[in-house]
Amino acid sequence: MKTLRIACLLVFAFALSGFANAGEAKSAPKNIPDFDVQGISMTECQCTAYACPCRSNGHPDHGSCDAADFTYIKNGHYGKVDMSGFKAVLIGDLIDPDASKVQGTAYFDKGTTPAQREAFTEMLSFMFGWNPPHIVGSKVVSIDFKESPDKNTYTLTIPDILEEKGVMKRDSDGKPLNVVPAMDLWGNKITYVDNVVFKYHDKGVGEWDLSGHQANVKEFHTTKDMYAQKKLLVQHGDMSGTWTAEQKDMIKKMGMKPE
């Protein structure tokens, strides 16, 4: 039951349908310990390459969206729990104008400890205080994530289930191209990358080959204080299809254009 509860929160946290307005949200738990986590997240989905409307306060142009959201906490803590090494990926129909249709399967790395899972559950409950969508299931698996030394190539594998590869483009000075402001659980920017491979096959659950569609990565440093002070674009969205006034102001202060 604990695993299912964790999976429920993971599904909702990873599912970008969680970009609801404040009026739809319940109060998040207030008495939680301080947290400070750093890591990397990679998302691939069926949206058009380099153009995910969900990241700029909108819904998918094609309705529902098959996707995989991966999170790797390299280091950090939640209260007294060391979160270093935590890995999980959520796969399924993760975004839909009808939130009741959102569903997915949560895959936890076998190296993740029960204490980390419980801590992650509480942390996400703080971040997202409203009801989670339907859960297809959860599994403990081997998750292999690799980041090349030059930080240009990212691969994610769950043996016999998931294969992903993203390649980042850089300019002549070595700076990442296609960095954009974005609504995201972990921060306010993402970097679009080439979706070289996105294949999923889990018998009885789902199957697709969406190679060539949308992919992005983001390195993050996320804290409880950021949420408490409402510093994230995701906290000011209404899914209207355009940036809200609050979001536009935040993006300008980031030195970026709210396009």
Image: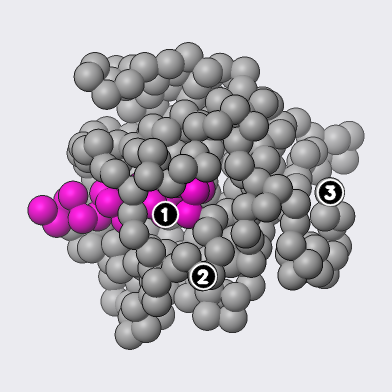
Q: Is residue 177 above or below residue 228?
A: above
Q: CA distance from mark 1 to mark 2?
A: 18 Å
**Horizontal and vertical percent for residue 230?**
60, 75
**Is the residue 222 above or below the residue 217 in the image?**
below
Mark 1 secondary-structure assignment: helix
Image quadrant where residue 108 sits:
top left
Residue 114 horizontal/vertical position (percent): 18, 57
Q: Residue at x 48, y 14 (%)?
A: 209
Judging by the rendered image, the residue that carries numbered circle 3 is 259
Q: Which residues are magenta?
A: 1-18
First-in-chain label (2 vs 3): 2
Callout 2: helix, strand or loop? helix
Q: What colouring does the structure picture have? A: one colour
- Report the residue marked by disc 1: 13
Residue visible at 59% across and 81% down? 229
Secondary structure type for disc 3:
loop
Q: Is residue 100 above or below residue 77?
A: above
Q: Are marks 3 and 1 in contact (CB under 8 Å)?
A: no
Image quarter for residue 88? top left
Nearer to me, 149 or 103: 103
**Which residue in the protein does label 2 denote?**
23
Q: Residue at x 35, y 39 (%)?
A: 103
What amino acid type is highlighted by mark number 2?
Answer: Gly
